[in-house]
Amino acid sequence: MTITGSCMCGGTTYAIEADSYLAALCHCTDCQKWTGGAFTSNAVVPRSSFKVTKGTPSAYDAVGASGKVNKHFFCPTCGSSLYTELEIMPDNTVVKAGGLDGGEANLRGKIDIEFYVKDRPSYLAPVEGAKQEPMFG
């Protein structure tokens, strides 16, 4: 199955060849700063299944709580967050769900896991049925 997505302006597009993915929310303070929101919603896919199909994203390297690099990719024109490659997860790409096409931003209606719940704002409740991780893994 092909899942597609893009930035807000359409200058950067991508495709994922995968039938399934891990649906994850991350509440870490880096994700909060990166999105300007309380968390990121993500489709975690095998890195080999992900391909940029149009444009060249810009990147910003941040050192995560693990001490390893989190490479954040975004559109150089509109600034949309696109995906992250985490040094701690070299075989996966963390695609920001908001850019997914065809209603896929809903993450198929099920969150598998929430990371960094220790940083989750107190006004948000845990997602019922999702594994709750205080930090990463």
Image (spheres, grey):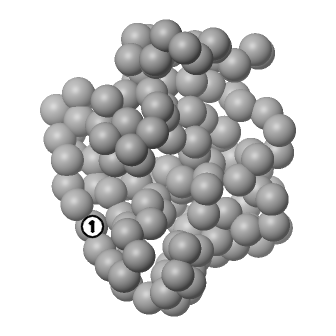
Residue 89 point in image, percent of width and height: 40, 43
Q: Which residue is mark 1?
A: 59
9 over 99 or under it: above or below? below
Query: What secondary structure is marked by label 1?
Result: strand
Residue drawn 50% across and 41% down? Answer: 40
Question: Could one spot residue 120 in this view of the protein?
Answer: yes
- Left-right relation of 5 to 103: left
Residue 51 point in image, percent of width and height: 54, 75
Residue drawn 79% across and 33% down? Answer: 110
- Left-right relation of 124 to 80: right
Residue 12 point in image, percent of width and height: 49, 82
In the orientation shown, which residue stands out farthest toward the front? Answer: 123
Considering depth in this image, is 36 or 23 the residue closer to the camera? 36
Residue 50 point in image, percent of width and height: 56, 68
64 over 13 or under it: above or below? above
In the rendered image, which quarter contains the C terminus? top left
70 over 16 or under it: above or below? above
In the rendered image, which quarter contains the N terminus? bottom right
Question: Could one spot residue 49 in this view of the protein?
Answer: no
Residue drawn 44% across and 66% down? Answer: 80
